[in-house]
Amino acid sequence: MRKLLFTALNTVVLMGLASVAFAAAVAPETISMIAIATAFGMGIAAFGCGLGQGLGLKAACEGTARNPEASGKITVILLLGMAFIESLAIYTLVIALILLFANPLIG
Amino acid sequence: MLPTTRINDRIEAFLAHRGFYLHDVRILVRNQLYLVALSFVVSLVLGLPSWALAFFAGAALSTMNFWLLAKGLQGAVLRSRGAVAVTLARFYGRMILTGLALFGLIIWGGFPVAALLAGLTTVVINILFWGMFQFHRQKGKEA
């Protein structure tokens, strides 16, 4: 099952990248570098956002456990923090999609 | 009672019925819904240019995200059984949907990315304005 999922995901990624590789008259090294940069960028963003969300959630859990009456206010603040952090990850996803599929610098 | 207050009350009653039991969260979601509606009306008035549609799509996408996040968090606090599985499923479902929607909008739709990003930023702007309003209200109470 895991192997099948891995193969399917690989196929999707390769099919997605194939259109870029064939459509643009750009050196393959450039495309490789863009793909690597995108992967690193998204990875770093996911790492930072995951760390931030985890810390926020940890603090919220501790706060709620210490003072259950304040759980309403804590939930609101947690929601705001999560929304802020998640928007950063979404921006990175947009940049990654632009770099991969709608890159203005490679025509 | 002012008509705007009546509309606010109706929307808040609808949101409360949908499971938004925290007052502040209801206000935030309500304001976000107003922003989406406003962007839709502006794009209709301007004759549906691509940048206005992209802004509306970004705002709608971020609102959907915010709605599901708010509802999921409130539900996770209340639910005693199966909270982890439901929250995880919701989170990954939301992320996959957002990714697919963004992919479709940017690659297949060819929407202007700057307007799309501006639409996605509406949630952040909404929260910032709400925070400023709360701060000023608290200052006013203290003074």
Image: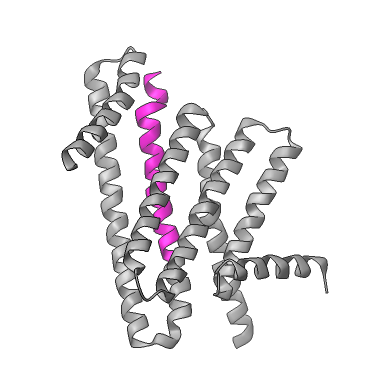
Q: Position of residue A50 (x, y in %)?
A: 29, 57
Residue visible at 45% across and 28% down?
A: B107
Q: Nearer the viewer, residue A36 or B103?
A: B103
| Colouring | one colour
Q: Viewed as shown, does residue A7 lie left or right of B87?
A: left
Residue that sits furthest to the top in the current view = A25
Q: Position of residue A24 (x, y in %)?
A: 35, 15
Residue visible at 30% across and 43% down?
A: A42
Q: Main secondary structure of the magenta part?
A: helix
Q: Is residue A79 above or below residue B140?
A: above
Residue B143 in sight from this viewpoint: no
Residue visible at 43% across and 45% down?
A: B97
Q: Nearer the viewer, residue B132 or B127?
A: B127
Residue B55 in sight from this viewpoint: yes
**Segment colored magenta:** A81-107
Residue that sits furthest to the left in the current view = A3
Q: Is residue A29 above or below residue B51?
A: above
Viewport quadrant of the N terminus of chain B = bottom right
> Picture quarter containing residue B137?
bottom right
Q: Viewed as shown, does residue A38 lie left or right of A85?
A: left
> Picture quarter containing residue A13?
top left
Q: Is residue B93 above or below residue B140?
A: above
User: Within the magenta stretch, is there residue A94?
Assistant: yes
User: Within the magenta stretch, is there residue A69?
Assistant: no
Q: Nearer the viewer, residue A88 or B59?
A: B59
Q: Position of residue A62 (x, y in %)?
A: 31, 80
> Picture quarter containing residue B45?
top right
Residue visible at 55% across and 53% down?
A: B63
